[in-house]
Image (cartoon, rainbow, N blue to C red):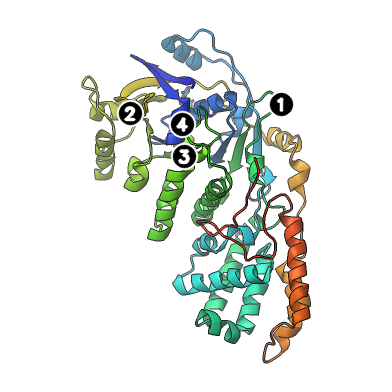
């Protein structure tokens, strides 16, 4: 067990390494020090050999890859903190980007992404969502891979043509609903979001790397553009989280976590979510702990975190909050209720008068109990606070050992092609015929081949219907 000194006030504030998987929340008004606190934590985790995943909404995280420089303000902070052996350092990073511009292309096949989160992204109504579900069922049963949007479109068209046959099996399938889904897909493509769907799919292991010195790699996912589509941003991060949840093995309560996931702008995850999704999020947050994953939610308003999630969070860091509007006053009240109060600290007054990079802390102690609130000044980060230039970013991407792996797009023979070739003839006929025995075995053989090439590294039973996890993504058994 390690004690990580993150801030100093009347007492030292230490985060205990085997409590990191009890999750945390970092809140505070804009410009009060949330991102810097996040970086300080991330640096510690990297030094401990713990890889991290961060969504970078403002583009102010990649400078963790460059050592910081002394200036007057930092010197003052260090003097106040009575730290005299401070050394600037850089950290190993891997940059990712759904759009493939500010990092390695981060992609996933539509098949792997699954129908539940895709329905949320497309904002489908219940009828449309159930049709999308049928599309995945049919593809899963036939062993057809839906790699990208083009494949999905051809599957939808196939279902449209053969709706009679499938309506018998699954209930009413209308042309209107399918057309509505197709229109929404077009909108997604117009926003460029189709770049996210395709191959090569991200291997979760690539987010869990250490460098040659055993330091955890900081995976920064550029989200400046992604956040324009709020649905896409939150569902994408939810997919990542569910992938981790589905693939990582149980480890109980490790002395040092396996991975830490920072969820910036966390309110987007909880905004307007339906009950089913909220229950699943709550389940993932609760159960991912024993897989050694800590989730750190970063958000401006503590009220953004719903109660059932808040109940799962052990460590709390609150930077300055304003308390003018009724909502802001409610925020302060919420902190007052969730913190264990120290008699010598007037939380209500303190929260509104904290300095930049100063915070109230309520962290778990060795026994897992909440410590009473402490006010303290956060240490400075060892890495730079200056933004990186475009050239620096490009050079990080170019030097990544994973560059080759994620550089090219693969258009493997997938639903689109196979439907064109094998079922294409079928579609033209008035009455779709059932595939003959030979066609069926041909399809199965194709499925086996495709699965072997896609999931070659996974242990899975071929030929069976695909098993899907909590959020409808494909279940994989990865050996770590
Ligand atoms: N621990 C710290 N050590 C040194 N400087 C700090 C620290 N915390 C904050 N600062 C200074 O305050 C500035 C603003 O902090 P930061 O970017 O973390 O705010 P934020 O809460 O993330 O704001 P936003 O909500 O707008 O993203 C930093 O650029 C830095 O100069
Ligand atoms: Mg910030």
Residue drawn 56% across and 48% down? 240
**Would you call the spot at circle 1 few (<14 residues within 10 Å), some (14-19), or many (20 or more)?**
few
- 471 in relation to 316, above or below: below
Residue 378 in the image, given as x and y percentages of width and height: 43, 22
* First in residue order: circle 4 vs circle 2: 4
In the displayed orientation, state which residue is furthest to the left.
Answer: 343
Is 437 on the left-hand or right-hand side of 15? right
**Would you call the spot at circle 4 few (<14 residues within 10 Å), some (14-19), or many (20 or more)?**
many
Q: Quadrant of the C terminus?
A: top right
Quarter holding residue 223? top right
Residue 323 in the image, given as x and y percentages of width and height: 27, 36
Quarter holding residue 472? bottom right
* First in residue order: circle 3 vs circle 2: 3
Task: From the image, tell me which residue sits under label 4.
Answer: 20
**Would you call the spot at circle 2 few (<14 residues within 10 Å), some (14-19), or many (20 or more)?**
few
For the residue pair 478 and 359, the one nearer the viewer reads as 478
Q: Is mark 1 within 8 Å of ligand 1?
A: no
Between the C-alphas of marks 4 and 2, the distance is: 13 Å
Between the C-alphas of marks 1 and 4, the distance is: 24 Å
Residue 113 in the image, given as x and y percentages of width and height: 59, 58
Checking the image for residue 289, the label placed there is 3
* First in residue order: circle 4 vs circle 3: 4
Q: Does the residue labelled 3 lie within 8 Å of ligand 2?
A: no
Per the image, label 4 sits on a secondary structure element best described as helix
Task: From the image, tell me which residue sits under label 2.
Answer: 369
């Amino acid at each position: 067990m390690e004690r990580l000194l993150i801030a100093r006030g009347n007492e030292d504030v230490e985060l205990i390494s085997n409590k990191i998987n009890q999750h945390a929340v970092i809140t505070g008004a804009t410009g009060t020090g949330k991102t810097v606190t996040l970086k300080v934590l991330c640096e510690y985790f990297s030094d401990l050999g713990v890889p991290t995943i961060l969504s970078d909404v403002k583009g102010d995280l990649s400078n963790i890859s460059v050592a910081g420089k002394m200036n007057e303000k930092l010197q003052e902070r260090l003097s106040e903190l009575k730290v005299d052996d401070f050394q600037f350092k850089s950290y190993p990073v891997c940059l990712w980007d759904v759009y493939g511009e500010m990092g390695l292309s981060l992609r996933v096949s539509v098949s792997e992404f699954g129908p539940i989160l895709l329905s949320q992204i497309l904002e489908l109504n219940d009828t449309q969502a159930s049709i999308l579900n049928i599309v995945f069922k049919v593809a899963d049963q036939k062993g057809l891979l839906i790699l990208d949007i083009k494949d999905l479109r051809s599957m939808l068209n196939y279902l449209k043509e053969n709706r009679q046959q499938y309506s018998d099996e699954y209930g009413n399938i209308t042309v209107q609903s399918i057309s509505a889904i197709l229109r929404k897909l077009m909108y997604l493509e117009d926003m460029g979001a189709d770049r996210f769907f395709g191959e090569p799919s991200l291997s979760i292991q690539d987010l869990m790397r250490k460098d040659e010195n055993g330091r955890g790699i900081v995976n920064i996912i550029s989200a400046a553009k992604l956040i324009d589509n709020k649905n896409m941003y939150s569902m994408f991060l939810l997919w990542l989280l569910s992938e981790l949840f589905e693939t990582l093995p149980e480890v109980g309560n490790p002395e040092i976590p396996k991975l830490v996931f920072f969820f910036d702008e966390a309110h987007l995850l909880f905004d307007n979510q339906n009950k089913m999704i909220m229950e699943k999020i709550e389940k993932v947050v609760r159960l991912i702990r024993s897989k050694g994953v800590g989730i750190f939610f970063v958000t401006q308003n503590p009220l953004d975190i719903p109660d059932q999630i808040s109940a799962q969070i052990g460590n709390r860091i609150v930077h300055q909050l304003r308390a003018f509007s009724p909502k802001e006053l409610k925020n302060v009240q919420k902190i007052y209720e969730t913190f264990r109060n120290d008699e010598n600290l007037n939380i209500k007054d303190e929260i509104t008068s904290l300095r930049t990079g100063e915070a109230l802390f309520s962290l778990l102690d060795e026994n897992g109990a909440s410590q009473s609130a402490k006010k303290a000044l956060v240490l400075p980060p060892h890495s730079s606070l200056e933004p990186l230039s475009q050239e620096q970013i490009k050079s990080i991407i170019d030097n990544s050992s994973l560059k080759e792996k994620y550089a090219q797009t693969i258009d493997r023979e997938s639903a689109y092609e196979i439907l064109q070739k094998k079922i294409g003839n079928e579609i033209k006929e008035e009455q779709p015929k059932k595939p003959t025995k030979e066609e069926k075995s041909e399809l199965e053989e194709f499925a086996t081949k495709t699965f072997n090439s896609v999931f070659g590294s996974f242990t899975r039973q071929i030929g069976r219907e695909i098993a899907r996890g909590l959020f409808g993504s494909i279940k994989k058994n990865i050996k770590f």
